[in-house]
Amino acid sequence: MFIIKVLFGRKKSILMKEKFARAAVFVKQKSDLIVDNIELPLALEVGQVLVKIFVSGICGSQIGEINGVKGKDKFLPHLLGHEGCGEVLEIGPGVKTVNVGDRVCLHWRKGSGIQSDPPKYKWRGQVLNAGWITTFNNYAVISENRCTKVDSDISIDHVALFGCAVTTGFGVIENNAELKIGESLVVFGSGGVGLNIIQAAKLRSAWPIIAIDLYDNRLKLAKELGAHYCINSNYLNPKHEIEKILGKNKLDIFIDNTGIPEIIEMGYELTNSNGKVVLVGVPKVGNKTGIYTLPLHFGKKIIGSHGGESHPENDIPRYMNLLKNNFWNLNNFISKRYELEQINEAIQDMKNGSSAGRLIIDMKF
């Protein structure tokens, strides 16, 4: 039975049954996360949802946060993680899009429902910050608009991937690149998002799809998922190799997942007069890219992507229907599973490229 109380006449809150969670706490940049117990808020506020998290993915964005690519982090200590799958345990006042017992995909892009205030956890006697979604914790208070109800016939691992890797990758092709049938495409960086960009490009019948990465295991998986050509930029000059593949033709679309200025500049040079350069990767703070801007006046485009501009409440069901009907698959996409206590090992494996696809953190309920 939920107990409702009024806080000084301002708003209603629901007292929570769960009092503690196990979480990976981000305390210091360029350092390991600390796995420890944290205190959950005493009550759910308007638009908040308590979720029991089954699994979480690890995205390159979290690696970037830990490495400080955007500069100093003023919110430390705080929690991390933005793609996962769980079950709704309790809902706060005003929540209408999910109910207790629902299986939900947890995503960082805004969906339908209320955007709540971020929760305030406690850790070792101090306030522990969090955003509207965190998934590196086995219980989490999440904003309603970061939860989308899903059917229970898709595995929890696959559901988690729709929180970022799938929706971003497919959204980049649909909404940013607006890829047409038969257009040529380079995907520079074949990690979790890059591999789904390749899968979405295959669904759109792009030709050729050229995958580039530093690691052969990722390129092998890229080939299995739809890339026609693979280039290891550790050993080969990617610009020369792309030009060999295309022959007399110029490239239609170049998608960069690295944020490295030299790679962005190369993509800009390779694309045709009406070509598109889509920037998915985030550059390190202070990095600048130099280009000759005249072609931008005559049809060439540079497009910055923000999660593929996806709309989770609409896109997740569409993409899941295609998955259910075998238009594409995630069977080989998950490389390895870890327990929460092993999260620093998982992060290191992602950094050094020893795992090809997405890594999953299993909360072991």
Image (cartoon, helix red, strand yellow):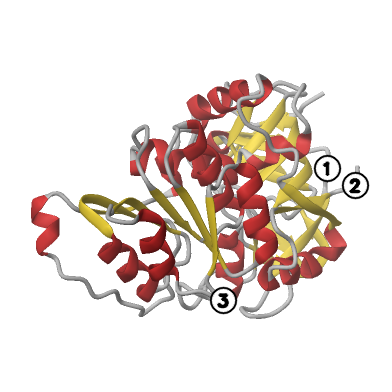
Q: Position of residue 116 (x, y in %)?
A: 52, 40
Residue 18 image label? 1
Name the image quarter holding residue 339. Answer: bottom right
Q: Position of residue 141 (x, y in %)?
A: 67, 44
- Of marks 1 and 2, which one's residue comes earlier in the chain? 1
**Of discs 1 and 3, which sits in the foreground?**
3
Image quadrant where one finds the N terminus: top right
Residue 364 image label? 2
Q: Secondary structure at mark 2?
A: loop
Q: What residue sits 36% from the left and 74% below the top? A: 261
Left or right of 236, for residue 181: left
Rounded to the nearest angstrom, the CA distance separating label 1 from label 2 is 17 Å
Left or right of 93, for residue 18: right
Number of residues whose C-alpha sits closer than 10 Å to that of mark 1, classed few (under 14), some (14–19) or many (20 or more): some
Rounded to the nearest angstrom, the CA distance separating label 2 from label 3 is 38 Å
Name the image quarter holding residue 148. Answer: top right
Can residue 364 be spotted in the picture? yes
CB under 8 Å between discs 1 and 2: no
Q: Position of residue 238 (x, y in %)?
A: 44, 69
Number of residues whose C-alpha sits closer than 10 Å to that of mark 2, classed few (under 14), some (14–19) or many (20 or more): few
Q: Residue furthest right?
A: 365
Identified by mark 3, the residue type is Asn
Q: Which residue is mark 3?
A: 234
Image quadrant where one finds the C terminus: top right
Vertical order, 193 against 232 (above or below) = above
Name the image quarter holding residue 326. Answer: top right
Q: What residue sits 50% from the left and 31% below the top? A: 203
Rounded to the nearest angstrom, the CA distance separating label 1 from label 3 is 49 Å
